[in-house]
Amino acid sequence: MNSRHREKEKDIKQGLSERVISYCIGRYAKLRYKIWMFRKESNESKLNLQDLSRICSEHVLPVTSPLALMAQIQGNGGTLLNQLFDGHPELHVHPHELMIGYPEKSIWPRIDLSDGPQRWFEVLFEDIVSEYNREGYKLEREDKETFPFVFISSLQREIFLHCIDSVQSMTMRAIFDAYMTSYFGAWLNNQNYYGLKKFITAYTPRLGIIKENMESFFEVYPDGRLISVVRDPKSWFPSAQKRWPGSFTEVGQAVSAWNKSAQAILWNKERYGDRVCLIKFEDLVSQTKAVMRYLADFLAIEFHDILLVPTFNKFPMKEDTSFRTENHGIVSSLHAEERKLKGQELNTIERMTSETYPLVLKEVVRFA
């Protein structure tokens, strides 16, 4: 190879090297620019979130209304009733099961006033909101019907601590008011946030079965209300067995739990009188308008047609029943859909509830 060819090859390699270097520099510059843009947008989004939190904190409405609680055994219509209350302009409706219980949701939280605000918030905080915030709200995990739920937990904590700081004389009620204020203040897509509210409604299964729970509840909310829905045990058992097969497999064990709930309902009614209202599940699904008119009077709120439609954050939803339906609204023919009890099961239920159920029926509200 002569010198002329070597020089030409050298020039080609040098040119290639320069182009490669130039290309790499260009790619690096673009990558740096993308990284810069990502960091810029990320920082701006953080600032926007901070601005959003600040704005929300500045416009939080105090929630000091008493609590109207539904707390009987599961499968009696507590979720359905809370869905019927949803959207009423005079109510704050807790959108899912109330889970402030500690150490589990069926135990009313014992707050120690000597603990600090951080601990109070840890006890009351409902971590299920993180799941609903990511995946949306649905009645059951396998349900296809999902509703948006926008909630900022860090904002709730900030609101709670701010409310506590503003309290001059600390009481149990002040702590719970601060929590409710923070909860509804951090629920950003709540369509029923504004307006004068007379009650907060919420449902927690089994919370009303333990006497100490109800004593603590009415200590915090002496102006509170307890609404207990009672279902015929012959209708309740097949429904509960299908919905919660792990908890109600054997009829004797299941009916013992039903009896315990019914006895607690009777005790609560005797102890707390007019602050307690007993409703039949069968009336709730077959005479919905009459029942909801009565409950509107019980809570001193005006009757609105929205009380007749189960909703989540004002979105219509299917009824919560173990016998699923594709149609929105309340199903009034549940008995026809439930499987027939076996003879032995029927005899066991009638025998075990022969004393308790008639006593409960004497206390429920009667509808013509």
Image (cartoon, rainbow, N blue to C red):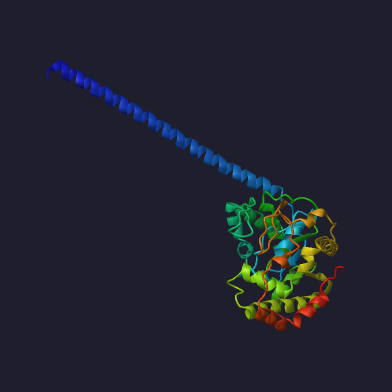
97 or 138, which lies in front?
138
| Residue 339 visible in the displayed image | yes
Residue 344, quarter of the rendered image: bottom right
Left or right relative to 287: residue 78: left
The residue drawn where x is 78% and y is 60% is 199
Residue 5 higher or lower than 358, as above or below = above
Left or right relative to 330: residue 100: left
70 or 45, which lies in front?
70
| Residue 110 visible in the displayed image | no
How far from the left and from the top, in percent, is residue 174? Answer: 72, 63
The residue drawn where x is 67% and y is 79% is 343
**Most extreme residue toward the right, as rendered?**
368
Residue 47 higher or lower than 222, as above or below = above
**Most extreme residue toward the left, as rendered?**
1
How far from the left and from the top, in percent, is residue 132? Answer: 61, 55
327 or 112, which lies in front?
327
Left or right relative to 24: residue 8: left
Residue 329 higher or lower than 240, as above or below = above
Residue 244 higher or lower than 183, as above or below = below
211 or 204, which lies in front?
204
How far from the left and from the top, in percent, is residue 242? Answer: 62, 69
Which quarter of the image is occupied by the C terminus? bottom right
Residue 12, quarter of the rendered image: top left
| Number of numbered discs visible in the structure rendering | 0
Residue 80, quarter of the rendered image: bottom right
